Image (spheres, rainbow, N blue to C red):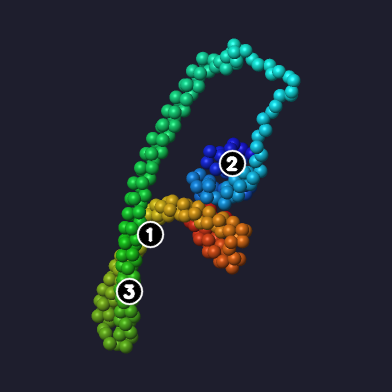
Amino acid sequence: MGANVSAVCPYLYRDREGKFKCDVSGEFVDPGLMPCLANFRECPLYARAKTATTTTLRPHTPEVAPPGEAPLYLTEREVTSRLEIPASLEKGVEEMEEEVAQRIKAIEIAASDLDEKWKIYEEDAKKLMKTWEDVSTNGNHTLRALNNVIELYEKLLDNLNILLQNKRISDKSYETLKKDLENNLENYKTIRNNIGQALKNAERLVIPHIQRIKVAEARPELGKLRLSLMKLEQLYKEGKVSQEVFEKMRNELAAKIRWLEQLVGEAQ
């Protein structure tokens, strides 16, 4: 088993490949999406393991020296010599402490800077999303209107051909009107194509920002839903929830979890 990272959840470990693993369930977990990093005390697995650990503890019994044998105490000088720490080691520790403190401070500054930048980015991205929704709606409305105009011109050309076939219009008038209708038709098609392509180009640039924001919002929600599912399963095991209610709620939670997993790219 790898290094213990129980500074957060005492049952969270890293294996030799660097993957996080729950020591209670024996399964790999993503601490960012589970309560391992902040709210691990709410996790039913933690509560269950904690209870099991507490009930199996035994009071410590100190060792007692055999009767009739006097302990061999060290002299004060021997104790002092054994407790003495070399000055070079103390200096080295102080230097390491200062270096670590400086690096931690640099990390804190960088993290705070990123937090501020992310906050600004998130606000700007949400404004972009709102603006894009308005522009996209208006653009699609314009495209529908152009499609209607184009269909109208195509019908006019059909009617013009019928008039020519029924000899209700001269060849000269037919050619003149046909040319005007075709020019207008091509002009509207060009406008439609330009607007459609512009919308696609803008969408290609906007979508990554929308997805980034939605994923950031989805991850905490995904963690909450997984925790709710774990609590539901625990209640069912304890006989506090009927099978009918359990299956209904489990299916609803599982469906939401699958949808969010697809959104954040975790779908299997």
Mark 2 or 1, closer to the camera:
2
Residue that appears at 55% across and 43% down: 9
**Horizontal and vertical percent position of residue 59:** 65, 37
Kindly check if marks 3 and 1 are in contact, taking CB atoms under 8 A apart as contact.
Answer: no
Name the kind of residue labelled 2 in the image: Tyr
Q: Nearer the viewer, residue 96 or 8?
A: 8
Q: Nearer the viewer, residue 47 or 162?
A: 47
Q: Quadrant of the N terminus?
A: top right
> In this picture, is 149 found above or below 228?
below
Point out which mark residue 148 bears.
3
Residue matched to label 1: 200
Residue that appears at 74% across and 24% down: 66
Pointer 3 or 1: first along the chain: 3
> In this picture, is 77 found above or below 203?
above
Residue that appears at 47% across and 21% down: 94
Name the kind of residue labelled 3 in the image: Asn
Mark 3 or 2, closer to the camera:
2
**Horizontal and vertical percent position of residue 254:** 55, 60
Q: Nearer the viewer, residue 152 or 200?
A: 200
Residue matched to label 2: 13
Point out which mark residue 253 bears.
none
Q: Is residue 208 at least partly visible in the picture?
A: no
Q: Residue furthest front?
A: 68
Please state if 185 lies on the left or on the right of 90 as rendered. left
Q: CA distance from mark 3 to mark 2?
A: 63 Å
Estimate how packed mark 2 is, as few (under 14), some (14 to 19) or many (20 or more) residues with alpha carbons within 10 Å. many
